[in-house]
Image (cartoon, rainbow, N blue to C red):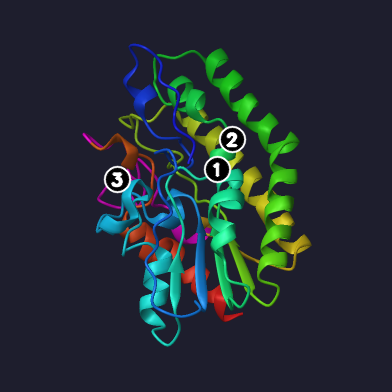
Amino acid sequence: MITLRHRTGTVLAALPLLLLAVAAPGPAAAATTAGRPGYVALGDSYAAGVAAGSYDPASGDCHRSTRAYPALWAAGHPGGDFLDLACGGADTAAVLSGQLPRLPAGTAMVTLTVGGNDLDFSDAVVDCLQPLTTEGRCTQALDHAAELLHDQLPGRLDRLLGAIGQAAPGARVVITGYPHLLQEHAAATCWAGTDDRRTRFNQLADQLDELIQRQAAAHGAQFADPRATFAGHGICAGRGGEWITGIVLPSLWESFHPTADGQSQGYLPVVAQALAG
């Protein structure tokens, strides 16, 4: 996904993008069996499984995990071939230019998680999640992300979904949304911004998911919504209930991503239901 822009003297500026991710797109090495794949996974770090651990060494900086929802679904359905092209750092343009050309025309099923890296959330991470930053800076960062969402992302998603339909015209296409990363009404000790800022972050995630759902419907794709399964498991959920990582040291690129539980219990059930049709 898009690499976070660094801000001198600010630790959080080294974090991955809030909604998804981080490392610049790496080589598109893929875990696959021989033959024409029946299922192909496309997308960003949320599809790759960044922060879930158990990374495939062959995936390099893409950090594809055997605990990510695509690999988990494929392991539970061993009758078909599986090609995993998801890569940490991918936005819609990276999927279109770097992953889609490897999608075989005879693919039966495609999953896609993308869109968060098309929004410039780096400033939002820095300007909203730190308690000492001002409301004005936070508002400006969120307004910028919302502007990208409304003005640019619809066209980008439309082009990408249209291209997937042309590349694999017979495939069942499932595009996922994103969960609420931050627990609202958390304890006063929550480090991730203020309650109001967490609410506004989640509202922006809702707008992103609503856009993805509309674009999916327009292209005859299925929408897999993880918000209900992740409910109560955001950052600052407490009591070991967090399915989203906070700040991960020293591997900052794993910050703000679903854990292995988030992949298996948050994403996998809704994706499996959508694939089953």
Name the residue carrying label 1. Answer: 116
Position of residue 262 in the picture relative to residue 177 (left or right): left
**Residue 259 within the magenta-colored segment of the rendering:** no
Q: Amino acid at mark 1?
A: Gly
Name the residue carrying label 2. Answer: 119
Q: How many marks?
A: 3
Nearest to N terminus: mark 2 or mark 3: 2
Could you tell me if residue 225 is visible in this image? no
Q: Amino acid at mark 2?
A: Leu
Give residue 90's position: percent from left, percent from top: 50, 45
Q: Secondary structure at mark 2?
A: loop
The foreground one among 233 and 6 is 6
**Residue 245 within the magenta-colored segment of the rendering:** yes
- Circle 2 Cα neighbour tier, 10 Å, few/some/many (<14 / 14–19 / ≥20): many
- Circle 3 Cα neighbour tier, 10 Å, few/some/many (<14 / 14–19 / ≥20): some
Q: Amino acid at mark 3?
A: Gly
The residue mark sitting in front, 3 or 1, is 1
Whether the residues at callouts 1 and 2 have beta carbons within 8 Å, the answer is: yes
State the predominant SS element of the stretch in magenta: loop
Which of the image's four quarters has the C terminus?
Answer: bottom right
The foreground one among 261 and 131 is 261
Name the residue carrying label 3. Answer: 238
Tell me which residue sits at (55%, 44%) in the image. 91
Q: Is residue 32 above or below residue 91?
A: below
Q: Secondary structure at mark 1?
A: helix
Alpha carbon separation for disc pair 2 and 3: 28 Å
Q: Which corner quadrant of the image does residue 15 belong to? A: top left
Q: Which corner quadrant of the image does residue 118 belong to? A: top right
Q: Is residue 32 above or below residue 1?
A: below
* Residues rendered magenta in the picture: 228-250
Q: Is residue 74 above or below residue 122?
A: below
Tell me which residue sits at (54%, 51%) in the image. 98
